Image (tube, rainbow, N blue to C red):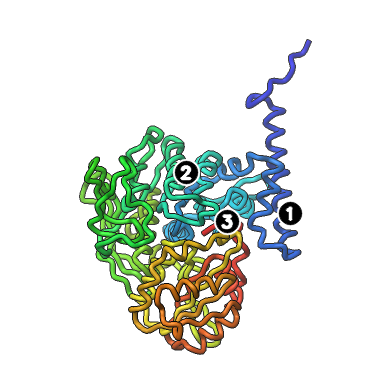
Amino acid sequence: MPRPARQGGGSRAGVAGRKLRLRAAVVLGKATGGMSRRLRLGGGTTLPGDVARWVDPGVLRAMAGSVRAGTVLVTGTNGKTSTAALLRTILAESGKVVGGNPSGSNLIFGLTAAALTLSDSQGRIDRDWLVLEVDELSAPQAVAEIRPQGLVVLNAFRDQLDRSFEVDQIAERLATATSTLPDGGFWVGNADDPRVAAMAGETTAAGTRRILFGLSAGGRDHLPAVSDASGCPRCRGEMEFRVVFYAHCGLYKCPHCGFQRPQPQVVASQVNLAGLDSVELTLSGSEDGSEGWSVPARVRLGGLFSAANVAAAAAAASAMGVSPHQIASGISAFEPAFGRFQVMPWKGVPIRLMLAKNPAGLEENLTAALELDRSPVIAIGLNDLIADGRDVSWIWDVEMERLRESRPVTLVVCGRRAHELALRLAYAGVPQDRVVVLQSARAALDAVAAMASPLIPVPALMTYTAMLEWHQLLGGGGGGGKGGRA
C-alpha cells in the first residue's frame, strides 16, 4: 500500500500548493490595485493588501523574504515618514536599489499593498533593501510577519486617545517589537526618549545589535505641557530633566532608582536651525566606544526634531554598512516627504505643509514656526475624521498661550473643527483680531495668500486629512490615500 504524502514543509504537494496560493494572492492583489486606481476608488495603497492577505495570509512574509539584503522597519509616534524617506535616500545614494511605502500606508494591509507594487507575479521583490514605515501599534505584528533585518524606534508620544491609548501602552507595543526581532539583526532606538531608552536594557534575541541615537545641542530647561513621560519607566518616580530637546525627549535622570539617559552611539551635535528651510549638523558615531567617525550634514527640513530624525536614519544606515560620507551625501540629496515641510505654491505664495497630528507634533511645529520663521501668517487645520482621530481634545494640552506674547502673527484656522480651535485660542488669550476662522480649505488658502509675503513660505500646520485636502488643492494629487497614520 502506498504511503500517503507527508503534510507540512516536507511535502512536495504542500510546497507546490503554497507557491500556487502565493502567486494567486499576488496576481489578485495587483489586479485589485489596478482596478481601484482605474475606478478612482483610491490610490491602491490598502485594498490590494486586504485581498492578497485573504487569499494567502503569509503573502507579506513571503514577499519580504525575497528581498536580497532584508527589510528595515521604521516606527514610533512621530517622524516615521521623514525618517524612512531619509533612510531610503541614503541607501539609494550609496548605490543600493531600495523599495518602500512612500504613500505612507503603514498598517499591515498597507505594507502588504506596498510590497505587491514592488513584486513580480511570483511574489519576488528585486530590491537590495526594503524600508517600510510602520504604525507603532502594528509594529509587533509587522516584526512577527516580516522578520526584518532591522527596526528603528523613534519615540513614544501620546497620539489619538480614541485609538492609541496612552504612552505606556504604546511603549509596551514598541518593546514587544524590539524583543521579538530575529537573531542577527539590529534595532536603533532613541536614547533621548526615556520610554525607548528603557528598552535598551531589556532582553532581545542573541546577536541582535542595539544602537542608540541622540542629540547633543539646543533644547530648553523645562518640560512642555504636552510631556506625558516625566515618570521613570523603571520605578515610576519623577525624573529630573537637565535639558529638554522636544516633548519629553532630552537629558534625564531618575533620582530614585538611578535610571538615566544612556550614551548614544550616533549623535547629532552642532545643530544649526536655518529657519524652517534646513538643519545643519554634525553627525558622529561609534558603536564600540572607539574614536569612530564624524561628518557634517545638511538636510532640507526644519526644527530640532528633524535633527533627531536625521540621527536615526544615520544610525540605521551605519548599521546597514553605509559609509559616513555616503550617509552625509544621502542626507544632502533628500527631498521632503509628502506633507512634511513640502513647499507648494498657491496664487504666487509658497505654502509649507507641516503635519501636526497630536500634541507633541503641534507643539513642536508651532514652536518652530514662531521661533524660526518670519511669516506674518500661520495656518492651522483641524479635522476629526478617522485618520485624524475623532477626539480633538488634545488641542487643550498644547501651549497656545505663547501666542499672546509671540511675534505678531495672524492665525488662519480651518477644518471641520475650526471653531473648537478658535475657542482654544480665545481661552489662551490670543487677541481675536489675530484669528481668522474659515472652515473651507480653499477659502483658508485664499485668505493666507492675501495676507502672506510672496517670498516667505507660510507654515501650514495640519492634521492628516486637512493636510491631504490642502495638498490636493495645491496640486499634489492628495498623496493617494494613507490607509494608516503618519
Instruction: Determine if residue 300 is in view.
Output: no
Q: What SS does tag 3 mark?
A: loop
User: Residue beneath label 3, please?
Assistant: 484
Q: Is tag 1's residue or tag 3's residue first in the polypeptide sequence?
A: 1
Residue, disc 2: 173
Residue 194, percent from left and from top: 33, 49
Position of 427 relative to 215 (above/below): below
Question: Where, quadrant-wise, is the N terminus in this rendering?
Answer: top right
Circle 1 SS class: helix
How far apart in space, not on screen, are marks 1 and 3 (Cα)? 21 Å
Tell me the kind of residue under disc 2: Arg
SS assignment at label 2: helix
Q: Which residue is mark 1?
A: 31
Q: Decide which of 178, 300 is in the foreground and name it.
A: 178
Image side of residue 19 versus residue 284, left or right? right
What is the distance, in whole Å, between disc 3 and disc 2 at their CAs? 17 Å
Percent across and percent down for residue 464 are 54, 65
